[in-house]
Image (tube, grey):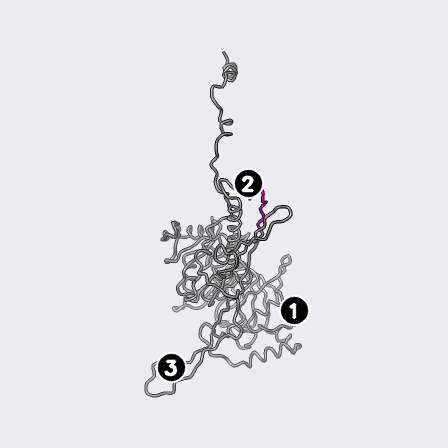
């Protein structure tokens, strides 16, 4: 008998027991709760100290500071031509508060585009500073003399930075460092001669610069705050200086932001299909998870209170070699006391791990709720997939000090809102429609505040792609 005939004979044999497909009609399946791929670890929400805000607004009072003009300059690119947005010239300290749009337009048109190859020297130490440079794209090193006469890198500038702003107000200014292109750079240069020509025809600019030069130099500490006069180490009976602590006249206020959605469930589903799991509870659980994911995203990226947008310019660093190295994280830590945590995209943590492997270093780990978290210098590095990754495979690493008592970064919420199911998160019954659909309003209120500028630092333009 052939193989085909044997199979045919086997198939014609009568069934001797109940088949599995029929048996399943009498069995009860074991089901999982609804799963959701969007759920992440949300370490920021878990590690951020939350402060209860009554009245929905939190005011950050600080000592009076005289440091202004610490922002970034924004550009518009059309083909290979780059132009500065005129209003963005107000980020320069000497033009802060100047609002004559026609004059700013004229200054923007006089900015001359220049291209520099890697290794090119833009400015030389000791030479006359007669231009303001606006860095549209690329990285520039500020190089000065080291203690033994060798070159030392004083800092790295990247997209949106500016340097040479002292040329606007001081005709005798000189370059105190050498600026050297690390990568190919696109720069807009505004000569002081052009600025003076515009000022000759513009009374508003002349008055602005005259007022700026007439303001007496204020005694400040290294943070730009008004100096508190003290006496120390004296003997005898000298006159003890009198002083007072001045405050900002218009402190910043943070209003609680909101994330909301309306959850709709048909009464037939809510009434009949609740075994073995309650449909309303599961719908609500996944909706709350999605709101919390959005909450963490806003805490990182929101233009008003997000951490990436509220980091001061002097606390933004650039990696020395593009990839995140131990040297870069050490620089982040050195900018603040009592750093509590790093936040980085998982791919940035992977890139940092590769750099450690190249150097033969093994990071220590700590246990956080059953998770092994890598650390650097004892500071945990938490993953956060809400930190954006650009098309150029670059991202940012955040370092922060947290807590009100430490003058750090805090989360803001309001506890005790109506129909609250978690702190600052409520579910309110909105009624049943004529189509028998139940509606619930799910709401969460939140924000974040940086109490002092050095509580938050960001390592920008971190390269996370593998290098050959």
Circle 2 crowding by C-alpha within 10 Å: few under 14, some 14–19, many from 20: few
Q: Nearer the viewer, residue 154 or 94?
A: 94
The residue where tag 1 is placed is: 105
In this picture, is 277 found above or below 205? above
Res 171 quadrant in image: bottom right
Give percent across and percent down for residue 137: 56, 60
Q: Which residue is mark 2?
A: 272
Q: What separation in Å lies between label 1 and label 3 (alpha carbons)?
A: 49 Å
Position of 220 with respect to 367 (left or right) is right
Residue 371 relative to residue 254: left or right: left
- The mark nearer the N terminus, 2 or 1, is 1
CA–CA distance in space, label 3 to label 2: 79 Å
Give me the disc on residue 231.
3
Q: Nearer the viewer, mark 2 or mark 1?
A: 2
Q: Residue furthest top?
A: 1
Residue 395 coordinates in the image, percent (x, y): 50, 55
How many other residues sit within 10 Å of disc 1, few (<14), some (14-19) or many (≥20)? some
Say which label, 1 or 3, has the lower sequence index.
1
Q: Say if the magenta span includes residue 265.
A: yes
How far apart in space, not on screen, are marks 2 and 1 (Cα)? 67 Å
Residue lying at 64% horizontally and 77% vertically, measured from the top left: 204
Relative to residue 222, is residue 427 depicted above or below? above
Which residue range is magenta in the image?
Answer: 263-273
Please name which of the two marks, 3 or 2, marks the residue nearer to the observer: 2
* Of the image marks 3 and 2, the number of the one nearer the N terminus: 3
As rendered, which of 198 and 350 lies closer to the eye? 350
Disc 3 secondary structure class: loop
Choose mark 1 or mark 3, whichever is in front.
3
Q: Nearer the viewer, residue 192 or 354?
A: 354
- Can you give x and y, in whole percent of width and height, for residue 167 in the image? 55, 73
Q: Are marks 2 and 1 in contact (CB under 8 Å)?
A: no
């Amino acid at each position: 008998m052939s193989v085909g005939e044997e199979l045919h004979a086997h198939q014609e044999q009568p069934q001797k027991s109940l088949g599995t497909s029929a048996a399943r009609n009498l069995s009860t399946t074991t089901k999982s709760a609804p799963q959701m791929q969007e759920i992440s670890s949300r370490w920021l929400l878990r590690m951020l100290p939350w402060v209860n805000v009554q009245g929905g607004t939190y005011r950050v009072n600080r000592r009076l500071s005289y440091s202004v003009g610490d922002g970034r300059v924004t550009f518009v690119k059309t083909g290979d031509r780059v132009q500065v947005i005129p209003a963005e010239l107000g980020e320069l300290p000497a033009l802060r508060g100047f609002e004559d749009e026609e004059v700013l337009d004229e200054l923007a048109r006089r900015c001359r585009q220049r291209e520099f190859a890697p290794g090119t020297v833009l400015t030389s130490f000791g030479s006359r500073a007669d231009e303001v440079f606006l860095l549209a794209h690329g990285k520039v090193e500020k190089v000065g003399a080291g203690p033994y006469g060798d070159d030392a890198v004083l800092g790295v500038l990247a997209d949106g930075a500016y340097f040479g702003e002292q040329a606007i107000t001081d005709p005798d200014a000189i370059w105190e460092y050498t600026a050297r292109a690390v990568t190919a750079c696109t720069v807009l240069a505004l000569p002081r001669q052009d600025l003076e020509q515009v000022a000759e025809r513009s009374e508003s600019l002349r008055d602005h610069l005259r007022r700026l030069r007439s303001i007496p130099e204020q005694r400040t500490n290294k943070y730009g705050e008004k100096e508190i006069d003290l006496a120390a180490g004296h003997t005898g009976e000298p006159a003890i200086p009198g002083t007072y602590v001045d405050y900002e006249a218009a402190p910043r206020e943070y209003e609680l932001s909101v994330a909301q959605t309306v959850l709709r469930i048909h009464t037939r589903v809510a009434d009949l299909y609740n075994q073995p799991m309650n449909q309303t509870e599961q719908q609500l659980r996944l909706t709350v998870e999605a709101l919390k994911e959005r909450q963490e995203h806003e805490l990182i990226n929101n233009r008003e209170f997000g951490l990436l947008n509220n980091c001061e310019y002097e606390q933004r660093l650039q990696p020395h070699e593009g990839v995140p190295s131990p040297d870069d994280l050490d620089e982040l830590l050195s900018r603040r006391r009592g750093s509590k945590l790093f936040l980085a995209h998982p791919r940035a943590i992977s890139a940092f791990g590769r750099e450690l492997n190249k150097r033969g270093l093994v990071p220590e780990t700590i246990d956080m709720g059953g998770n092994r978290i890598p650390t650097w210098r004892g500071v945990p590095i938490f993953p956060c997939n809400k930190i954006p990754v650009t098309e150029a495979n670059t991202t940012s690493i955040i370092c922060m000090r947290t807590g009100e008592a430490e003058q750090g970064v805090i989360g803001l919420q309001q506890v005790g809102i109506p129909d609250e199911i978690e702190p600052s998160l409520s579910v309110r019954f909105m009624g049943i429609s004529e189509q028998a659909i139940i509606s619930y309003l799910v709401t969460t209120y939140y924000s974040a505040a940086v109490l002092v500028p050095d509580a938050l630092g960001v390592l920008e333009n971190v390269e996370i792609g593998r290098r050959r």
